[in-house]
C-alpha cells in the first residue's frame, strides 16, 4: 500500500491553470496516470469557482476565458458562477480524459533520489521529473493588520467568507479594498445595509475604455517584471483598473462608491481616521485580495529574500523542474490558459534533455 509511484509530470491543482496544463500534456502525448497525474484537494471540479458566493453570477464575470479546446456555450448569465463553471470543468475533464484525482492534498514537494521530485500527498508518495503548480490563491486570503483590530466588537470577514448580501441587512458595513470584489460587495450590500462606507488605500481608477489586448499586455508586463526580480506578484487586476459597468456608474452616482482613504485605526465600535473622524460599524468586510498558495513547495527553498519566487516565464529560475501557472502575470483565466501551454512546452524540452529557450 505504501509504495512510491512514478510519473513524468505531476500537476497540483485542477482550476483553470491546472486543467489547461493537463490538456496540453495530453496533447503532447503524456498519458493520464502514467505520463502525468493531476491532484486536487477540493471536493469537486471547478477550482476556486466552486467556493464563490452565489450572487457572483456568470453574467457578472469579466473576461472569463474558456479552457483550451472546448467552448463554454449557452450558459445562463443569471446562474451562479459556482454552478456554471464547475459543470463546465467537469465536462472538460471527462471530454479530455484528464482523470483528476480528488480529493488529494499535496502536502510537500521535496528533492528526491535520481534528480526526481518527491511529491508527498494524502494518498501516498509519488515521484516526478517535473511539477506544474496550479494552486491559485483562493485558499490564502490576505488580511492586512491595523491598530486596534483585535478590539473590534463587531464581525470581521474576508471576501473568501462572503456568501451574499442578505446577512448584512440593517448592519453598518465598512468595506475595505479597491478591487473588483470590493466594488461588487458594496453594490450588492448597499440596498440591504443600514449604511456602507468604502475605504481604499489608493484612489480607485475607473476604466472608461474597453480593456483591449494592448492594455492587457501592458498590465501583465508590469506583474511579470516583479516576478522576474523575485518579488511577490501583485494581482493583474490591481494594475488594470476597474471597469465602468452600468452598475458601477449607478453606484458612483448614488454615492455607494464614494471612497474614503484608509482609516488609521480600528476602535471597538468602528474605524477612526487620523483627523478624528469616526464611523460606527457592525461589520468590517476585508476585500483585500489573496496571496499565492505555495506552502507545499517550501522544502525546495525557492523563495527569494524579496519574498517571491524568481521566475522566467512559468519556470522557477532556481529549479527548472518546477513551473508555476496561474501565478503572478498568469493569474487570470486567459493567462492561466497560456501559462499551461508554455509550461508544457518547456517541460517537454527539459525531459528531452534540451536547454530551456532563453526568454527574449
Ligand atoms: C472573486 C473573484 C472573481 C474573479 N473573476 C475573474 C474573472 O471574471 N475573469 C478572470 O479571468 N479571472 C477572474 N478571477 C481570477 C480567477 O479566479 C483566476 O484567474 C483563475 O480562475 C484561477 O485559476 P487557478 O487555476 O489559478 O486557481 P484555482 O481556481 O484557485 O484552482 C486552484 C486549485 O488548486 C487546488 N489546490 C490548492 N492547493 C492544493 C494542494 N496543496 N493540493 C492539492 N490541490 C490544491 C484547489 O483545490 C483548487 O481547486 C477572479 C478571482 C476572484 C477571487
Image (cartoon, rainbow, N blue to C red):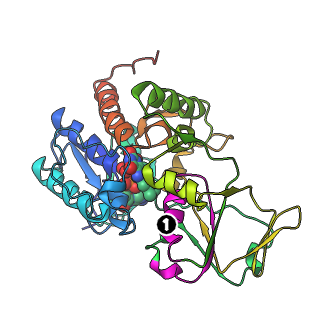
At 89% across and 62% down in the image, what residue appears?
275
Q: Is residue 237 visible?
A: yes
**Residue 355 lies in the magenta-colored region:** no
SS at mark 1 in the image: helix
Residue 158: x %, y % from top left? 56, 68
At 44% across and 24% down in the image, what residue appears?
214
Please give the residue where the numbered disc 1 appears in the rendered image.
Answer: 160
At 25% across and 50% down in the image, what residue appears?
37
**Residue 175 lies in the magenta-colored region:** yes
Image mark count: 1
Residue 258: x %, y % from top left? 65, 57
At 54% across and 61% down in the image, what residue appears?
141
> Which of the 4 image quarters holds residue 223?
top right
Task: Reply above or below: 209 against 126.
Answer: above
Name of the residue lying farthest toward the right: 275
Q: State left or right for residue 178 relative to residue 134.
A: right
Task: Reply above or below: 316 against 238.
Answer: above
Asked whether mark 1 and ligand 1 are closer than 8 Å, the reply comes as no
Q: State left or right for residue 19 relative to residue 180.
A: left
Task: Reply above or below: 245 against 69.
Answer: below
Q: Nearer the viewer, residue 230 or 180?
A: 180
Q: Is residue 117 visible?
A: no
Q: Nearer the viewer, residue 138 or 351?
A: 138
Q: Nearer the viewer, residue 61 or 123?
A: 61
Residue 73: x %, y % from top left? 16, 48
Residue 335: x %, y % from top left? 38, 37
User: Dot 1: within a 10 Å radius of its alpha carbon, few (fewer than 14), some, or many (20 or more) residues?
Assistant: some
Q: Which residues are magenta?
A: 166-192
Identify the image quadrant of the N terminus. Answer: bottom left
Amino acid at each position: 500500500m505504501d509504495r512510491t509511484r512514478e510519473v513524468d509530470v505531476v500537476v497540483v491543482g485542477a482550476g483553470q491553470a491546472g486543467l489547461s496544463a493537463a490538456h496540453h500534456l495530453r496533447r503532447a502525448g503524456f498519458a493520464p496516470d502514467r505520463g502525468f497525474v493531476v491532484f486536487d484537494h477540493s471536493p469537486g471540479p471547478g477550482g476556486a469557482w466552486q467556493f464563490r458566493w452565489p450572487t457572483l453570477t456568470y453574467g457578472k464575470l469579466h473576461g472569463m476565458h474558456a479552457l483550451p479546446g472546448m467552448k463554454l456555450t449557452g450558459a445562463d448569465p443569471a446562474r451562479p458562477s459556482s454552478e456554471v463553471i464547475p459543470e463546465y470543468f467537469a465536462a472538460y475533464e471527462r471530454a479530455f480524459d484528464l482523470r483528476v484525482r480528488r480529493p488529494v492534498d499535496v502536502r510537500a514537494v521535496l528533492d528526491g533520489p535520481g534528480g526526481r521530485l518527491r511529491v508527498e500527498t494524502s494518498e501516498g508518495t509519488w515521484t516526478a521529473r517535473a511539477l506544474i503548480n496550479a494552486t491559485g490563491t483562493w485558499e490564502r486570503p490576505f488580511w492586512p493588520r491595523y491598530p486596534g483590530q483585535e478590539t473590534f466588537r463587531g464581525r470581521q470577514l474576508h471576501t473568501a467568507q462572503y456568501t451574499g448580501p442578505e446577512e448584512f441587512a440593517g448592519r453598518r458595513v465598512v468595506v475595505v479594498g479597491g478591487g473588483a470584489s470590493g466594488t461588487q460587495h458594496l453594490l450588492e450590500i448597499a440596498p440591504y445595509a443600514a449604511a456602507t462606507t468604502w475605504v481604499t488605500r489608493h484612489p480607485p481608477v475607473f476604466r472608461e475604455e474597453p480593456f483591449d489586448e494592448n492594455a492587457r499586455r501592458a498590465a501583465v508586463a508590469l506583474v511579470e517584471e516583479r516576478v522576474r526580480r523575485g518579488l511577490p506578484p501583485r494581482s493583474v487586476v490591481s494594475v488594470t483598473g476597474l471597469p465602468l459597468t452600468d452598475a458601477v456608474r449607478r453606484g458612483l452616482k448614488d454615492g455607494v462608491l464614494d471612497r474614503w482613504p484608509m482609516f488609521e485605526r480600528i476602535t471597538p465600535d468602528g474605524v477612526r481616521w487620523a483627523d478624528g473622524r469616526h464611523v460606527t460599524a457592525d461589520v468590517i468586510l476585508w476585500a483585500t485580495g489573496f496571496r499565492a498558495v505555495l506552502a507545499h513547495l517550501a522544502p525546495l527553498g525557492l523563495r527569494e529574500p524579496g519574498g517571491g519566487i524568481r521566475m522566467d516565464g512559468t519556470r522557477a529560475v532556481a529549479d527548472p523542474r518546477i513551473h508555476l501557472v496561474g501565478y503572478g502575470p498568469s493569474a487570470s483565466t486567459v493567462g492561466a490558459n497560456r501559462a499551461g501551454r508554455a509550461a508544457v512546452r518547456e517541460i517537454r524540452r527539459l525531459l528531452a534533455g534540451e536547454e530551456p529557450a532563453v526568454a527574449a
